[in-house]
Amino acid sequence: MENGPSTEPGSQLGSPHQPDEKSPLLGNDKWTYSVNCDNNDSLLFNRRQGVYKRRWYILVVFSFTAFMQFMTWNTWGPIAGTVESVLPDWSNSDIGLLTNWGPIMYVVTALPFSWLMDVKGIRVSVLVAQGALMIGMALRCIPVSTDYLKWTMNLGQIFIGLAGPVIMAGPPLISVTWFPPQERTTATAISSVCAYFGLAASFLLGPLIVQDLHDNSTGIITVGPMNNEDLGVSDDISQTEINEIWHLMYIECGMQGLLFLMTIIYFPTKPPLPPSISAGTQRIDFKSGIFKLAKHLQFWCIGLAYGIPSGIFNAWCTAFVIILSHLHVSQEEAGWIGFWGNIAGAAAGIMIARFVDCIGGRIKVILIVMFSGAMLSFGWYLLLCYQLIAFNTVMLYASMIAIAVFINGTIPLFYEGAVEATYPIAEGITTTTLTWLNNFFALLFLLILTIPSEKTAWMNWCMLGAIVISMPLLILFKETRNRLAVDLTVNPSALDDDTIES
């Protein structure tokens, strides 16, 4: 497949240049042209493209990496009630700290990982992330007494958190490197929402392996540190639950070991030919890109509209057992609510992304509609939570799933909207900063959670405020499709399905 360059308003094609060894994705037999975009950045691109079937393997491996990172990040929240019951010196603040290592490590290491993705490429970045996950899960499997369990588990969560920047910022980089324009948003959606499939799996796998302990007198899970006599369980049962926690650690470590081996065997940095004009175009260098992004007003509009509600929602989900305890919702029930909510949100993200690929835009309008739905759904949940309307479990499920659909379903659109608006700044820089905001606000939420307190109402009102504040930011955002414009200017058939060659 080869299309000659054409000229349209907003872009100018200069004379051809011979490629050099620094030109990405280019060989000695390929011509390049200088393109002057509306932002006055001169870009060097490859006029030959190719699309390969192996792109789906790359997407699957990366998506399962995201799945594992999110699942193991949220290991402890879904089993918090049992952990605090069989390990009396563990409390809500200890569970909160274990979860908090994810956003802490993201906030601290985002800049070097952004450089790694931009300069060293996808393969090196993914191997580093996979290695960190492997070390973290292996540390959690070290057989120590319960007196030292906090140390090994916290150290393991630190390494699991180290994988976060590549996992969260990588999806747009995978999609632009391997997928043509008409599949980019869908590919971004699959790899980004697979993380939320992992989050959903944590709500299923943990309670499935670690037995839910109930107060014998009420039948309701007791959240908080209690001794075995208070809970009415024997030492034998307590040891059984501790063994089940170890089994959970071993299972997750084994899954990660298999995935790490697959990545080592085959995970190339890039295809022989780029899948689109923009994929083969030189990006602004790392240092200049950072400064340009810092001054990019439209990025901050969409970045904060994503980071505040999404970050707080991720942290809010990890505390379901605590948040719903006053409604007499068991650990197992809270797990199922989290599971179905994240499954529905991830599925919605893929379907909405495919719709955007088909219509070629309208990201801002869809985001505003989705967040309007999120506000209504959360209002419904609050009415149930405070029993201002008749409470029942079915309504609770429906409201929580609706919230997850409207918030998680927007994540791929935020990714694509941000990288399109900031192009030709490198996707790794843009998405790392975007997801840094997500983790920063999640960190603030979880830091408050580590403060010993029995009050939980603030979590719900914080979540509502995060949704509401995103609306004016989305209204101010001006949607642009800079990256797609380059593809269509040079190759007007870039969105046609019949241009794909596998």
Image (spheres, rainbow, N blue to C red):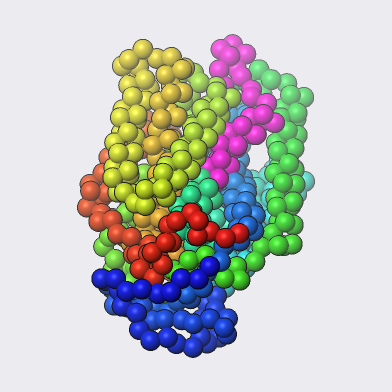
Residue 25, quarter of the rendered image: bottom right
Give the total number of marks visible in the rendering: 0
Task: Name the spot of residue 173 as percent of width and height, x first.
Answer: 50, 62
Answer with left or right where residue 251 lies relative to residue 324: right
Residue 33, quarter of the rendered image: bottom left
Task: Name the spot of residue 97 as percent of width and height, x first.
Answer: 53, 46
Residue 52, quarter of the rendered image: bottom right
Q: Nearer the viewer, residue 28 or 98?
A: 28
Answer with left or right where residue 250 lies relative to residue 118: right
Bounds of the magenta span? Answer: 194-223
| Position above or below: 394 against 202 | above
Q: Quadrant of the C terminus?
A: bottom right
Q: Nearer the viewer, residue 329 or 302?
A: 302
Asked whether the viewer can see residue 327, the reply is: yes
Task: Name the spot of residue 450 as percent of width and height, x first.
Answer: 47, 42
| Position above or below: 301 against 318 | below
The structure residue drawn at horizontal position 60% and vertical position 68%, both measured from the top left corner, is: 271
The reply to whether the magenta stretch includes residue 204 is yes
Asked whether the viewer can see residue 107, the reply is: no
The reply to whether the magenta stretch includes residue 354 is no
| Position above or below: 65 against 388 | below
The structure residue drawn at horizontal position 36% and vertical position 58%, both measured from the top left corner, is: 418
The structure residue drawn at horizontal position 33% and vertical position 24%, both measured from the top left corner, is: 380
Task: Name the spot of residue 138 as percent of width and height, x first.
Answer: 72, 52
The structure residue drawn at horizontal position 53% and vertical position 67%, both measured from the top left corner, is: 1
